[in-house]
Amino acid sequence: MSPPIARPQAVLFDCDGVLADSEAMHNQVVAQAITELGWEMDAAEAERRFIGLSWRGIVPLIEARLGPDSVPGDFVEGIVRRVLLSLEQEVPAIPGALAAVQAIVAAGIPVAVASNSSRAELATKLRRLGLAATFRGRTFSYDDVAQPKPAPDMYRAAAAACGADPHRCVVVEDSVTGSRAGRAAGCRVLGFAHSGDPAALRAVGAEPFFDMADLPGLLGLELAA
């Protein structure tokens, strides 16, 4: 585990794979939608090819494979509808994530969330996790910025919403794409490598850790009992 870092001005969270344990569902939805277009794919391949990308960000990759007119104009909206239906059934939390957020908030450190999902999806996830009030006014989706991750826009906006200098913020990410966004924004990035490749996260400047219960300690805080 990395040593504790200086107390940050704000902690900026990704959502999927960091707060919400929703990536398996996302991968299944994407795989099914792309298979229906004629590119047969399972959830494992969807994760490998598209992890960390926004829904809009995967469209050029599909068109590169299937052709420029292969993706219907309502493709992204259709995926969002499917995901929202699944989210209304269940949004499990990443083990230890809710307690970690509680400890950070209790210590008086502002928090924000920045996700490459749509505004509607992010709002639903936070509501189902019981975090809507915690992040109110400091939630950012790909609908809220000019460019999604790996561009730095989202994390710069999240830092500004917390009244913080990005260079004194910590980003908590689990993907290479999101880690690149955090580093491009000037933030220190802790890479949650619970199911990914710590070497890949380290290669883009993130500091890997493996248990969300360790996060408060990495920030120099005590985990709430």
Image: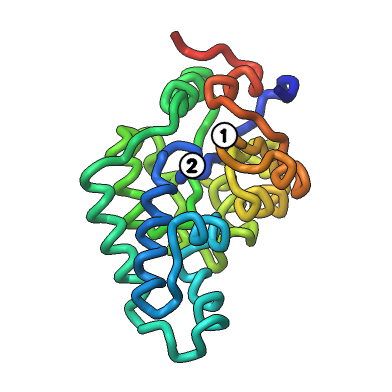
For the N terminus, the image quarter is: top right
Q: Which mark is residue 178?
A: none
CB contact under 8 Å: marks 2 and 1: yes
Please determine whether, in this image, residue 77 is positioned above or below residue 47: below
Numbered-mark total: 2
Kindly identify which residue carries mark 2: 17
Left or right: residue 108 compared with residue 131: right
Q: Position of residue 146 (x, y in %)?
A: 54, 68
Q: Residue at position x 47%, y 70% from top?
A: 56
The residue type indicated by label 1 comes to His
- How far is the residue under mark 2 from the one under mark 1? 9 Å
Q: Position of residue 162 (x, y in %)?
A: 54, 40
Kindly identify which residue carries mark 1: 194
Q: Position of residue 192 (x, y in %)?
A: 60, 36
Q: Secondary structure at mark 1?
A: loop
Tell me which label, 2 or 1, sits earlier in the chain: 2
Q: Secondary structure at mark 2?
A: loop
Q: Residue at position x 52%, y 32% from top?
A: 110
Q: Residue at position x 69%, y 34% from top?
A: 208
Q: How is the image coloured?
A: rainbow
For the C terminus, the image quarter is: top left
Please state which of the two labelled residues, at mark 2 or mark 1, is closer to the viewer: 1
Q: Residue at position x 43%, y 72% from top?
A: 40
Image quadrant of residue 163? top right
